[in-house]
Amino acid sequence: MIDKLSASKLRLAALASSVCLYAIAAPAFAGEEVLYGEASEWVEPASLEAEAASEGPAALIMDWQHRLEDGIVTSYSDTATRIDNPQALMEHGTISLSWLPDKGDLTIHRVEIQRAGESIDVIGQGAEFDVIRREQGLEQRLLDGQLTATLAVPGLQVGDILRVTHSVTIDDQALGDEMQVLQYLWTEPWQVGFARTIVSWPEDEQIYWRAEDHAELGDPISKDGQKRIEVTLPLAEMPEMPYDAPSRFKRAPVLRVGTYADWQELSRTMEPHFTKAAQVEPGSEIAAQARAIMAKTEDSLHRAALATQLVQDEVSYLLNGLDGGNYLPQDADLTWEKRYGDCKAKSVLLHALLSEMGIQSQTVLVKTRGGDAIPELLPVPGNFDHMIVRATIDGKDYWLDGTSAATRLSNMAAVPPFYYALPLTAEGNDLVEMTQRDQPSPTMVMSVVSDYSAGIDLPALFTLEMQFYGAQGAGFRKMADEADEDSLRQVGKSFANSNGGGAVSSVALEYDDEQAVGTLTVTGIANSEFQWKQGRLVVESDMAPNAAFNANRAKPEWREIPVATNGPMRNRIIGELILPDDMTGFVYEGTEKLEANYANTRISGLSGLQGNRFSGEVEIIQNLGEIAPDQLPEVKRAVRRYASEESRLVAPEDVVWRWELDRRELDKRVAPIIAEYGKAIEFAEEDDYTPLTARAGFFNDIYRFEDALADVDVLVEKNTSANVLQWRAGILYSLGRAEDAIADLQSAYDIEPENWTAMQLAEMMAYEGRYDDALELLESLPISDDDSSGYAGTYATVMGLKGDKAAALAALAEETADKPQNADGLNADCWFRGLFNTGLEGALDVCTRAIERANNSAPMLDSRAMVHYRMGNYDAALADLDSALELSPGLSASHYLRGAVRLAMGDKGGREDIEIALRISPELKARYDLHQIKVD
């Protein structure tokens, strides 16, 4: 049988399926030599017309013919290919043909080159195939037992036609007189000159056949005591199917022909091999293992779990396919002795153990992919690709897979997603539906604790723990045993990159063999989840997963197609936020108890706020299944009802921002965060600068510019880029080192000559009195339509600083006339008038138009406030600045101007605003002093 591998579409019969490795020298078979001879009389040769051969697709003939007779399947293949180019010569210059020598022969009928109307008989001129044993699956612990005959075609040239005809016979030991053929039916847009498949048999053979409806297969034709089915290829292109249709609606067309009347006959035919292989003597090692398990527990379920664990852990996977091993199982005793086996061998061993313990069990055939289609298929062994064991305990079925991993009592009730199984019984069995049920225990449990003790507008210290149970966690055993510091650092780096920044300070991997759970623990620093929305800091709860159900059955031809649901899966997510001790007034808005049921998905959860801790837990259970078309409207309504439920944690209105804290208090609060950044830097790989970059950004965000500069200096030295140089320029400017900042900006511009970098550089030059240098740089820029507003604002600032306000206003007037609806251009005009105290008449109209057209109006409100300030409208200025800071609380320029306005109104509290502004942006005082906005 095919053991967890799909048969190649081009294989002529499913009997040439996967096989397993046997660790002794294989016996010699009659089929190990390549035979040469004429094709059988039943073959209907295809003709190749000269005119057709010279044009059209390069594949001229693809002819597959199969004969079922007296328990032997003969598969004939005829291909003709035009060698149109050197690539085709490379591809077809060596012929490779495979067969199973323990089941039949490979016979070469023809290797022929057609050139300029002449035929060259390659075999007739003495060429012979070489035979090699080539196993392509050794890295997956597979040995399929095939031999491969190869021939480098002598003299083949571009422009030739290569024609190869051969036959392969299969007389499968396991099937006796039974036979089967599976032939893939190619569909458009496959291009070929002539293609077909023919299956024939004597009239006195009892043969059954079936193909997908798309093939429009007719009845066999009887002639001269023979029956035949012929299919012309390619078939019409397969109809488009919705992506979420059950796999049986999307399966490729295959012609299946065989001698099995029904599933019961197939079950009866296969059963004796597996029953015999599972027989063990009372004094055998297997019997001793069964007694040892029984001594540990009297519970049948626990015994079955221990037996499954024994087979999974003590017997390695090796596919044994030599000497008839495709369908014939290895004896249980031999499997235990050798400690290796494929799915058949492991299932037989597990069946033997269970039988020794008095637990009812059967070996069963399953299909690991597309199993929902099995009832529609012709009963043949080639439909299946895997074997497991069905154990019945207290009237309940348990599906046990010896090739899986980490089966334990807690998870053995899980039903694999195979849909149907065929039990192998002496009386013959029909297909058994593998009825789904909720997974008994989680597959994954994720727990995240985020510590916001320092402040909710600061990064959080986090601890993430992910536990993977059963087969999903089994891979952790090897990882935990082999994990070294470099591997753990790679995990940390990947985690940080996939979670939007932050830094990882430690990674640990553990595996608990008794519980079969692998645990990944990650600690570090994460960006704050709190977002400023409508005047409050909030966390949108992500404890409830997004509801998504986008089944589309709008097309008339799709309306009767069910929707497939994935599964089985059971995950649990646990989250906790530790809030600052000195903050009260948090409010949770949402449903504390969550219950939802839709599309074979069940979600339950609890969320709540207790003291300074917000916690939530949600469990998601998804089951394999389908949704009938007439149920879709109600399912969609249920999904929408669930998706409409919102939940969030809202911070109090009087939240204390980091810029409102004095230096000492802020440093005290952030000390644990800085220490964790240090651990992350130490943990990272030598050339991984992600944690150092994160710490530099954090230092910048808490206004420790000298510390930020020290980190960025390292980045410039070790990992420089235009962005890093721009970043350092900003830090240097905040520290009052304007010339150094200009030098960095110039270097950044030399590396990446971006217009925005040039504009920033020009403005900085102008504020340092280098007007001509700034103008020369601006005049050299290629300005696109997208850059024009920024350019006009920068040009105006340079000209204004130079003393030519008229030229500045003219440039801005031209920009706003050209783009009267552009908020950025209008804001540049408004800002210049206020900052340079010029053109104030009509300025408010420009400013208001900018506010009305902006997506984020905070900068525009700040600009209009500047105009009001210049005009002496302090109340209006204050109102605009309050609005700007409500939208963007950390806008330093608005804090500074609000301080100036409040002081001008006699409110000494304006000093607090000034302090906050200079804490965030120390460079503001010198710049605003230059524009006569003095607060001393």
Image (cartoon, rainbow, N blue to C red):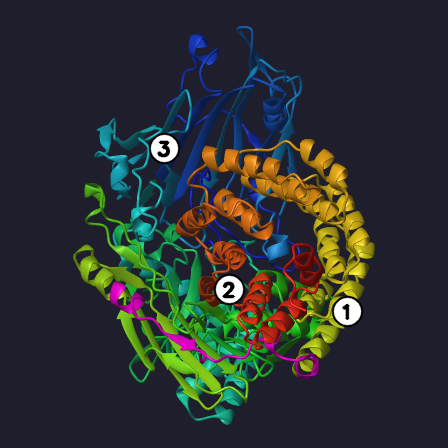
Please state if 704 lies on the left or on the right of 360 as rendered.
Answer: right
Q: CA distance from mark 1 to mark 3?
A: 66 Å
Name the spot of residue 250 as percent of width and height, x first. Answer: 33, 46
Name the spot of residue 229 as percent of width and height, x first. Answer: 28, 32
Q: Look at mark 1 in the image and give the residue it sits on.
A: 707
User: For the residues carrying marks 1 and 3, which lies nearer the camera in this image?
Assistant: 1
Q: CA distance from mark 3 to mark 2?
A: 60 Å
State the residue lying farthest toward the top: 117
Q: Nearer the viewer, residue 523 or 70?
A: 523
- From which residue to which does the magenta span run? 640-668
- Amino acid carrying label 2: it is Ser
Please state if 64 lies on the left or on the right of 286 as rendered.
Answer: left
Residue at horizontal 42 percent and vertical 23 percent from the top: 192
- Amino acid carrying label 1: it is Asp
Q: Look at mark 2 in the image and give the residue it sits on.
A: 888
Name the spot of residue 154 as percent of width and height, x first. Answer: 66, 20
